């Protein structure tokens, strides 16, 4: 086994959180090595929706595949259209987003090694398998786990994952002008189904907390619902992803967790991209300034706990879940609240596997 030179900051995972962290550190003069087990950065099971309050205003316009000022929302009893002055949500290809973020991190000075899998962690170094089949030992000063719901860094820290959501997504060839949210509590419980148009494909899927519905049942309900919308998905390829919403902290001495590895995704919406980026930058700021309090993470955790309360209530009382859903959409319909208020509250902020 070869020993490589120690690196100031090693980031495991080249997703949005890891790349955001890498870019911020490198931009501030830190040496950064990002390790990505896949050979291609970006592809992931994801509906690819990004919101106005999240990434939409910060992503180059030429990367967007669809931009929507109108949102169509369906419940068991209601159908409404919400219109915004500015685009409410846009769609983006996850590979396109990943490649753009990787380019930004590299331009800042970060090094990215693809096809490199970290498989052993100690307090002073990690051991990785390289594309040529060799094992290498690399020392670190700071280790950042940005490696998703099944994070090896989280496992090394001994932190279990008890709160997981499941998102199931189909990418179907075709074009569609309307972006739709289906809050059908009979089919999806506290989750929802979606139809998100991209450039030449349509993302059709569903998300739900695993405590409310097993993955097999969710897929069955998704196929039934999609058929009613005119889409036969039985011959299409389904892709699924776990969403970790079990937050137990980001800062553990010189080891850090961001995004799904930290459990910062929403158990209610599945939103993950924006929390990953925000937490990635917050971790970078903490590394640069150990006294940084990371208020943005505290704000996300407060919102996440509100979402978990809704999940628990809906699991115990499906009728209450349905009533709350109808009440929220009625308030939206009467313009007593607006979509952006709900978006900030988290009900419609989907930027990840389900959304």
Image (cartoon, rainbow, N blue to C red):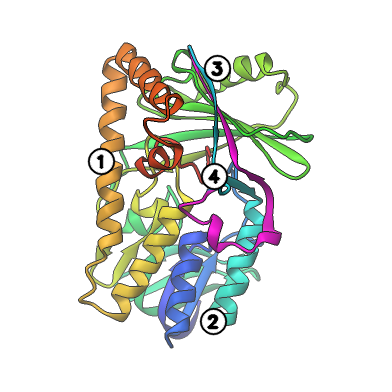
Mark 1–mark 3 CB contact (< 8 Å)? no
Residue 65: image location, x then y, percent: 70, 50
The segment highlighted magenta reads 51-76
Q: CA distance from mark 2 to mark 3?
A: 45 Å
Is any atom of residue 66 visible in this view?
yes
Taking depth in this image into account, of 132 and 247 the one nearest to the observer is 247
Question: Between marks 4 and 1, how big is the CA–CA gap?
Answer: 25 Å
Magenta-colored stretch includes residue 61: yes
Mark whose residue sits in front, 4 or 1? 4
Q: Earlier in the sequence, mark 4 or mark 1?
A: 4
Q: Residues within 10 Å of mark 4 (few under 14, many from 20)?
A: many
Provide the residue designation for mark 2. Answer: 108
Compared with 334, 155 (above or below) is below
Disc 1 crowd rating (10 Å Cα; few below 14, some 14-19, many 20+) is some
Q: Tell me, for residue 305, which label it has, or none.
A: 1
Spatial CA span between label 2 and label 4: 30 Å
| Label 4 element class | loop
> How far apart are the two marked residues, 1 and 3, measured between alpha carbons?
27 Å
Residue 87 included in the magenta stretch of the image = no
Which residue is under mark 3?
221
- For the residue labelled by badge 2, is the local secondary structure a helix, a strand or a loop? helix
Asked if disc 3 and disc 4 are in contact, CB closer than 8 Å, the reply is no
Asked if residue 279 lies left or right of residue 94, the reply is left
- Could you tell me which residue is drawn at 26 percent across and 65 percent down? 294
Q: Nearer the viewer, residue 225 or 143?
A: 225
Residue 251 percent across, percent down from the top left: 26, 64
Mark 2 or 4, which is nearer the eye? 4
Tell me whether the residue at label 2 lies in contact with that at label 1, contact meaning CB atoms closer than 8 angstroms: no
Q: Which residue is mark 4?
A: 88
Q: Name which residue lies at 64% across and 68% down.
A: 131
């Amino acid at each position: 086994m070869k020993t490589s030179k120690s690196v100031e900051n090693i980031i495991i995972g080249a997703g949005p959180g890891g790349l955001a962290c890498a870019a911020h550190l490198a931009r501030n003069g830190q040496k950064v090595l990002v390790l990505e087990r896949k050979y291609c950065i970006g592809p992931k099971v994801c509906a690819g929706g990004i919101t106005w309050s999240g990434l939409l205003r910060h992503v180059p316009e030429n990367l967007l595949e669809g931009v929507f000022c109108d949102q169509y929302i369906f419940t068991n009893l209601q159908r409404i259209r919400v219109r915004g002055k500015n685009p409410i949500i846009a769609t983006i290809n996850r590979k396109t987003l990943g490649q753009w973020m990787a380019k930004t991190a590299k331009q800042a000075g970060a090094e990215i090694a693809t096809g490199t899998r970290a498989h052993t962690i100690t307090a002073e170094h990690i051991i990785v398998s390289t594309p040529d089949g060799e094992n290498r030992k690399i020392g670190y000063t700071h280790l950042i786990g940005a490696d998703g719901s099944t994070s090896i860094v989280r496992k090394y820290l001994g932190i279990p994952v008890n709160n997981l959501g499941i998102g199931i997504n189909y990418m179907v060839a075709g074009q569609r002008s309307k972006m739709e949210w289906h809050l059908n509590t009979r089919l999806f419980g506290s989750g929802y189904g979606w139809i998100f148009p991209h450039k030449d494909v349509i993302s059709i899927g569903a998300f739900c907390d695993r405590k409310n519905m097993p993955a097999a049942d969710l897929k069955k309900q998704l196929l039934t619902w999609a058929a009613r919308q005119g889409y036969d998905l039985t011959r299409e390829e389904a892709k699924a992803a776990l969403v970790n919403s079990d937050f137990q902290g980001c800062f553990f001495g010189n080891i850090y967790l961001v995004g799904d590895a930290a459990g910062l995704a929403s158990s209610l919406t599945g939103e993950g991209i924006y929390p990953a980026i925000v937490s990635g930058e917050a971790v970078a700021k903490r590394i640069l300034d150990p006294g940084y309090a990371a208020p943005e993470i505290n704000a996300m955790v407060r919102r996440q706990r509100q979402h978990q309360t809704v999940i628990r209530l809906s699991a115990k009382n499906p009728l209450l879940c349905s009533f709350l859903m109808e009440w929220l959409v009625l308030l939206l319909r009467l313009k007593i609240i607006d979509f952006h208020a709900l978006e900030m509250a988290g009900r419609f902020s989907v930027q990840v596997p389900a959304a």
